[in-house]
Amino acid sequence: MEIVFRAAVTFAFLAVLMRAMGRRELSEITTFELVLLVTMGDLVQQGVTQEDMSLTGAMLAVGTIALLILATSYVSFRYPKTRRVLEGMAVVVVRDGRILDEVTRLERLTPEEIMEGARQRGIADLRRVKVGILEADGRFSFITGDGSRPDGEEPPPRRAS
């Protein structure tokens, strides 16, 4: 039972840690950061199982974390108001071709990162952008002045209310 408790505490700690790191940091990790995350995973495993090398201990730890992931997914689906806390929310970083400095400071974004995201979407000049959004998963979305998406993506369908 101690392994289940340790796994639950570790899950909560990692959830808070990942949210605190910010979305851009997690969506564009470097090779070194990937190695650190793998190392962190090993350290977490040792903390959860207390060097318990049994199959039962591993199954309890992984099962607990998997159940907590499913639970947070269900809560987010069932209670939409919790999505902001559990998944984050999209924020507008460009409006009418201008970078919103206050938002970019809060999100720890540089103008170069926004320009890079725009170039990846085929936008050479931010003045064409009506709205630029940093999505909850760390990717950028841009809507140009004519209302189209420059990369040809269709917006997601709206749900019937």
Image (cartoon, rainbow, N blue to C red):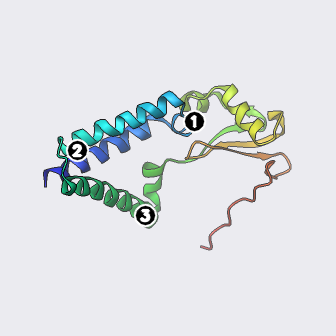
* Residue 17 at x, y percent in the picture: 38, 37
| SS category of the residue bearing label 1 | loop
What residue is rendered at 40% in x and 37% in y? 38
Closer to the observer: label 2 or label 3? Answer: 2
Q: Which residue is mark 2?
A: 48
Q: Is residue 115 above or below residue 87?
A: above
What residue is rendered at 42% in x and 40% in y? 18
Q: CA distance from mark 2 to mark 1?
A: 28 Å
Along the line of sight, the residue nearer the viewer: 135 or 26: 26
Which amino acid is tagged 2? Val
Q: Earlier in the sequence, mark 1 or mark 3?
A: 1
Q: Which residue is mark 3?
A: 79
Q: Residue furthest left?
A: 1
| SS category of the residue bearing label 2 | helix
What residue is rendered at 79% in x and 49% in y? 151
Along the line of sight, the residue nearer the viewer: 5 or 3: 3
* Residue 67 at x, y percent in the picture: 32, 61
Which amino acid is tagged 3? Tyr
Instruction: Specify the quadrant that holds the N terminus.
Output: bottom left
Query: Is mark 2 in CB contact (under 8 Å) with mark 1?
Result: no
Closer to the observer: label 1 or label 3? Answer: 1
Visible in this render: residue 70? yes
* Residue 20 at x, y percent in the picture: 42, 36
Q: Earlier in the sequence, mark 2 or mark 3?
A: 2
Q: CA distance from mark 2 to mark 3?
A: 30 Å
